[in-house]
Image: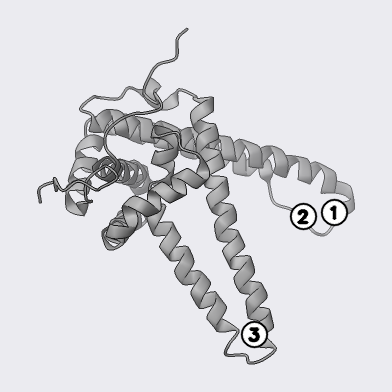
Amino acid sequence: MAVSLMKDPQGGSSLQVIEAVKQGWQAFVRAPWVFVGFTLLAGVLSTLCSLIQGNAEMDDVAVVGVFQLFRLAVGGVLSVLVSLWSTTGLIRGAWTALGGGSPAFATFTRWDGQASWRLFRNGLVLGLLLAGILVVAAVVGVGAAQLNQVLAVLPFLVAFAVVIYLAVNQKFLAQIALLQGAGPIESIARGRALLDPQWGSVLLLALVEFAIALLGLLACFVGLLVAVPVILCVSTAAYRQVFGSDDLTGLLVEPVA
């Protein structure tokens, strides 16, 4: 299926799912061992963060409570940093490969504080928005339950529909944050403006990526090492179709020593 040349009125092109999958896979195979190696490294670091957090013990909180809280705090902060670093690295590597280059390991591992901050703030605002929707649904549901138990279900059904809607049209929130540098509200509005008209295609893309992840799970740990970078490559290829291929923030630019 050829890439559509029909331009969106606000920039970019219409999403072609099959072409995005092809482009994503081609990007992955340009440096498969580098993608897999970095994913393995990120997975090991995430596991170490989980080990630092440990398991909360409920039977002797007075003795281990302070130490456990310290471990949870340190492990939680490190886990977020690893997630930001690995997501930024994979998108940078995918962007390089989609542009025809062969990303080196250093392409993935370079820390970019400004990019990580943009990714964090945008993800945090979206997370708070989704949490707020669920809280409102819970409050309305409790009130509706006083009238009728059946009515209590309706706010959660509405909230579920809204969450799915937002999750789909914010599919490229990470790429927008890293490559366009837009703030949280602007990024959410940008996603809605360009993806609402082709919401069904974006949903199909999300389902295809879910299928790739499922295949990775069925192939156990080794399969996920391939599935995760392939999904990021496919998603980034789709982003380039819709939003264009300009790096507006200098994500690929090496810092001056």
Identify the residue at horizontal 37%, vertical 30% (top origin). Answer: 92
Quadrant in the rendering for residue 201: bottom left
Where does the image place residue 241, in percent across and percent down from the top left? 24, 43
Residue 68 placement (x, y as % from top left): 77, 45
Label of residue 187 in the image: none
Quadrant of the rendered structure where residue 51 is? top right
* Marks 3 and 1, the one that precedes in the sequence: 1
Q: Amino acid at mark 1?
A: Val
In the rendered image, which residue does mark 3 sit on? 144
Residue plotted at (59% across, 67% down): 134
Q: Residue at x 30, y 57 (%)?
A: 202
Above or below, 144 against 186 in this view is below
Residue ID for mark 1 = 61
Q: Amino acid at mark 3?
A: Ala
The vertical placement of 64 against 257, above or below, is below
Q: Residue furthest front?
A: 9
Q: Residues within 10 Å of mark 2 (few under 14, many from 20)?
A: few
Contact between marks 2 and 1 (CB within 8 A): the answer is yes
Q: Residue furthest top?
A: 257
In the picture, measured across the screen, residue 223 lies left or right of residue 3, that is: right
Q: Residues within 10 Å of mark 1 (few under 14, many from 20)?
A: few
Compute the Cα span from label 3 to label 1: 38 Å
- Disc 2 from disc 3: Cα separation: 37 Å
Asked whether residue 190 is in view, the answer is yes
- Residue 133 pos. (x, y %): 57, 65
Residue position for label 2: 57
Amino acid carrying label 2: it is Glu
In this rendering, which labeled residue sits more in front, label 2 or label 3? 3
SS type, badge 1: helix
The residues tagged by marks 2 and 1 sit, at their Cα atoms, a distance apart of 7 Å
Instruction: Identify the residue at image location x=63%, y=92%.
Output: 148
Disc 3 is placed on an element classified as: helix
